[in-house]
Image (cartoon, rainbow, N blue to C red):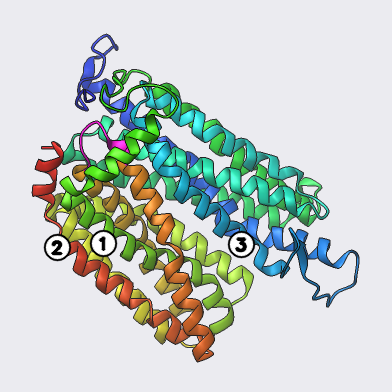
């Protein structure tokens, strides 16, 4: 059996189902607000450089500056500067394996809001525990980062599926965009506060490393505390009835359900086409975001303070960009709006190629354009896919959505790295990423959203 429609909230809730639905949506927005602050402060800005410091300290064992020793990781020699990248790769691969099962579990859960907390709070605890990363404790850093990433991705699957519970299909573009906007605003606010702490640690009587550890912990506390809002605020959603089918019960039921879903995916060709398009163009987006700092530093000669300013500008503009794309989707449709966004990503790549070395004003103008399209394309991709997934299997399909994204997210960085190595410059490496946006847009144009929604029973 499937879950009740989005508006069928508990009529016993005061003020009736209409206001209850509005409250539920506001609670749902807060999970993007909660986890995005961690993503920005920890995953994007502070963790990787700090883990590199710990790893280099462990490798050099008190040797003065200029040490180039490798770090021994399970008997393998690893450059300290590469440890954070390998940690991200490990967490990404583990997530790709875990997420389909997390989705299957979520579709069998009666209370998804409770499961959201169950998945989120271990990650928030791990992020908060980063306050203990001192000396040369790089092993603890790797462990905590992997736990936080697995928790973040699993909880995101549940949160994405909850979109189908708090918004009817016609409303999901706007609702999803508001959630992304809230996340970017939270990331901007907490990162801004933490940069004050890191830049002026003496204000709190801390040294530089103490300020970084405090900032890392603040992101975990923010994530954990604000997760309480959707967990409690969505408690009036109707309890879901787990599917009664051939999967049966028991511990292995989610795994059997997942196998059956994968076999049945061919019955939803539009969802499959969308997934393929999304994996391609999202890989391009993620690679541009991941490569921006190294491109700005190595190719254009910008310093750390300039790059941090860039991150803050992107976050601030992305808040408005997500809302703007939501309004555009209401007028032109989500598919056309995302296609227009991919066209703007092509402009971003070409413009970045043309930015002269040291031209910081041009770089900031480019950051504004990135912020404009970053949140909007991702938010509308989420809402588009929500229309193509079968009713009652939303979390499982969003598990495939997240897992496929992570399972292919290494392709863009591989292309970027290979072209940079072969050409000796980051500029042609950046241009090579155009193929992801061109091919992704071509694939997206082939998706018939209306037919897919009918096939999925989404109306």
Mark 1 in CB contact with mark 3 (< 8 angstroms): no
Q: Residues within 10 Å of mark 1 (few under 14, many from 20)?
A: many
Q: Which residue is mark 3?
A: 86
Question: Residue at the bottom extreme?
Answer: 423
Q: Position of residue 261 (x, y in %)?
A: 28, 40
Viewer-closest of 224 and 388: 388
- Could you tell me if residue 355 is visible in this image? no
Q: Which residue is mark 1?
A: 277
Secondary structure mostly seen in the magenta stretch? loop
Q: Residues within 10 Å of mark 3 (few under 14, many from 20)?
A: few
Viewer-closest of 455 and 366: 455
Question: Residue at the top extreme?
Answer: 12
- Quadrant of image for the N terminus: top left
In this view, 76 is above or below 20: below
Q: Which residue is mark 2?
A: 446
Viewer-closest of 456 and 437: 456
First in sequence: mark 2 vs mark 3: 3
Please give the range of residues in magenta.
389-396
Q: Residue at x 42, y 38 (%)?
A: 101
Query: Residue 247: which numbered mark, if any?
Result: none
Q: Residue at x 29, y 11 (%)?
A: 14
In this view, 178 is above or below 65: above
Q: Residue at x 8, y 48 (%)?
A: 451
């Amino acid at each position: 059996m499937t879950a009740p429609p989005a508006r069928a909230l508990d009529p016993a809730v005061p003020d009736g189902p209409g206001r209850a639905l509005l409250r539920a949506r506001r609670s749902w927005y807060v999970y993007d607000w909660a986890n995005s602050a961690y993503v920005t402060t920890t995953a994007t800005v502070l963790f990787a450089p700090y883990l590199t410091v710990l790893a280099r300290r462990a490798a050099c064992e008190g040797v003065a500056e200029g040490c180039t020793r490798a770090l021994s990781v399970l008997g393998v020699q690893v450059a300290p500067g590469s440890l954070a990248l390998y940690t991200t790769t490990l967490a990404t691969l583990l997530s790709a394996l875990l997420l389909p099962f997390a989705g299957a579990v979520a579709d069998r859960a009666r209370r998804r809001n409770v499961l959201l907390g169950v998945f989120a709070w271990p990650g928030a605890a791990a992020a908060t525990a980063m306050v203990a990363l001192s000396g040369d404790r790089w092993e603890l850093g790797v462990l905590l980062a992997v736990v936080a990433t697995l928790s973040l991705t699993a909880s995101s699957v549940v949160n994405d599926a909850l979109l189908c519970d708090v918004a009817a299909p016609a409303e999901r573009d706007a609702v999803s965009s508001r959630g992304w906007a809230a996340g970017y605003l939270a990331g901007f606010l907490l990162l801004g506060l933490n940069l004050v702490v890191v830049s002026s640690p003496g204000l709190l009587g801390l040294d530089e490393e103490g300020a970084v550890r405090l900032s890392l912990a603040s992101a975990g506390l923010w994530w954990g505390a604000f997760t309480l809002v959707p967990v409690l605020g969505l408690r009036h959603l109707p309890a879901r009835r787990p599917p009664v089918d051939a999967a049966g019960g028991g511990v292995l039921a989610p795994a059997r359900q997942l196998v059956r879903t994968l076999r049945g995916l061919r019955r939803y060709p539009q969802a499959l086409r969308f997934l393929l398009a999304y994996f391609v163009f999202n890989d391009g987006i993620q690679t541009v975001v991941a490569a921006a700092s190294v491109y700005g530093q190595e190719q254009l000669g910008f310093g750390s303070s300039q790059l941090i300013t860039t991150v803050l500008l992107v976050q601030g503009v992305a808040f408005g960009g997500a809302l703007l794309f939501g309004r555009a989707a209401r007028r032109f449709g989500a598919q056309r709006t995302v296609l227009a966004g991919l066209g703007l990503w092509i402009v971003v790549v070409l413009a970045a190629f043309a930015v002269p070395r040291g031209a910081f004003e041009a770089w900031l103008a480019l950051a504004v354009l990135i912020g404009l399209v970053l949140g909007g394309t991702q938010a509308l991709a989420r809402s588009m896919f929500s229309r193509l997934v079968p009713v009652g299997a939303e979390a499982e399909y969003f598990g495939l959505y997240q897992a496929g994204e992570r399972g292919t997210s290494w392709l863009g960085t591989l292309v970027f790295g290979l072209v940079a190595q072969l050409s000796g410059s980051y500029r042609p490496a950046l241009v090579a990423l155009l193929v992801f946006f061109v091919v992704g847009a071509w694939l997206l144009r082939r998706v018939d959203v209306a037919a897919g929604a009918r096939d999925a029973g989404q109306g």
